[in-house]
Amino acid sequence: MRYFEIKINTTQDEIDLLTCILMDMGIAGFAIDDARDFRDLLNKKNPHDWDYIDENLYEMENLKTGITFYLEETEEGKRILKKLQEKIEELIKVVPDPENKVDFNQLEMNWQLVDDADWKDKWKEYFKPVKLTERIVVKPTWEAYEAAEDELIIEIDPGMAFGTGTHPTTFLCIQLLEKYIEKGKDTVLDIGCGSGILSITAALLGASAILAVDIDPMAVKVTKDNIKTNHLSSEVRVIEGDLTNGIDVKADIAVANLMADLVISLSEDIPRHLKGKGVYISSGILIEKKEQVVSAIETCGFKILEILEEGEWCAIAAQIKGEI
């Protein structure tokens, strides 16, 4: 099917009014690029926004504010497009109102025809089976793969939640889980489960029970879908929640692939969710923040078992010093 891809560039002051106009025309599905949000992210408005950012993003500081949406190439789509073009021309002619700061002189609309056959499956070419450890392989569902003896296969389709296994923060966690899970005995708490890949790994490695927790309802949905795809619904329970508020569960191993600041803030709560001398595996930590995280974990009653590093990332395995 072919679509009209429509892009409207505007100003930050007019973005809200323009979205209302589009919705009045029956156009509800659109993506907004707001330069304010981008600048807030680059300036790290919130301490937990990011630990690492690609320097190439700084070249996009002059990102335009605008809206992108699609209309099917049907008679109705053509009608809406024509009506929209007329509306944009009318808005451009509106005399600016200094009091209300309404000025559509900078409105700019462009459109082109695109074919979904060009892009809907193209991205799949970039996702192939990847061997993360000697035993564990992650692959998308559409790729055939013949497992060797003792290999464990995880099927994960790239989606809206983070975690297809190929990022160092994920496969470092997987290496540590592979080392510390005692098959048929240990229970696992997956904190901030994302796509559920660590919960799936724990189940395949023989954990007796796994609880996957995330505050993001989309991550919970994606995790449930991936757990079902891997036929592990009886081994893994998935819930939406915050470990620091209202979750009362103890496990032999807790794993948190998040980021340094979140690992530090969670470390105080982890001991009450671990049995005996439980193991705490944390990742998503830049090496430059390693000592800061290690200090926080040790302050919370853990001893460091080992630290794995890959590129600029590290993962930490720690154990409670005495029984809780």
Image: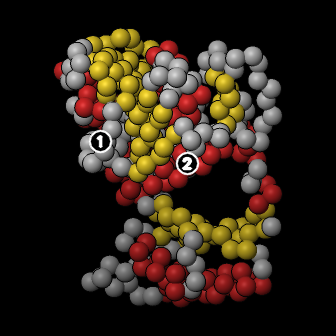
What quarter of the picture does the C terminus occupy? top left
Q: In the rendered image of this protein, does residue 162 appear above or below residue 311?
A: below
Q: Position of residue 293 (x, y in %)?
A: 28, 23
Give the image's coloring scheme: secondary structure
Q: Residues within 10 Å of mark 2 (few under 14, many from 20)?
A: many
Q: Residues within 10 Å of mark 1 (few under 14, many from 20)?
A: few
User: Residue at horizontal 79%, vertical 62%?
Assistant: 115
Mark earlier in primary sequence (2, 1): 2
Give residue 55's quadrant in the image: top left
- Three-letter amino acid code at the position of disc 1: Asp
Q: Which residue is mark 2?
A: 224
Q: Nearer the viewer, residue 137 or 121?
A: 137
What quarter of the picture does the N terminus occupy? bottom right
Q: Which residue is mark 1?
A: 248
Query: How many labels sit on residues?
Result: 2
Q: Nearer the viewer, residue 20 or 170?
A: 170
Give residue 318's quadrant in the image: top left
Q: In the rendered image of this protein, does residue 287 appear above or below residue 138?
A: above
Cα distance in 3D space between marks 2 and 1: 21 Å
User: Residue at horizontal 67%, vertical 67%?
Assistant: 5
Check disc 1 and report its element: helix, strand or loop. loop
Q: Position of residue 206 (x, y in %)?
A: 55, 25
Q: In the rendered image of this protein, does residue 39 appear above or below residue 256?
A: below
Check disc 2 and report its element: helix, strand or loop. helix
Residue lying at the far left of the rendered structure: 299
Residue 89 visible here: no
- Disc 2 versus disc 1: nearer the observer: 1
- Three-letter amino acid code at the position of disc 2: Lys
User: Residue at horizontal 65%, vertical 18%?
Assistant: 135
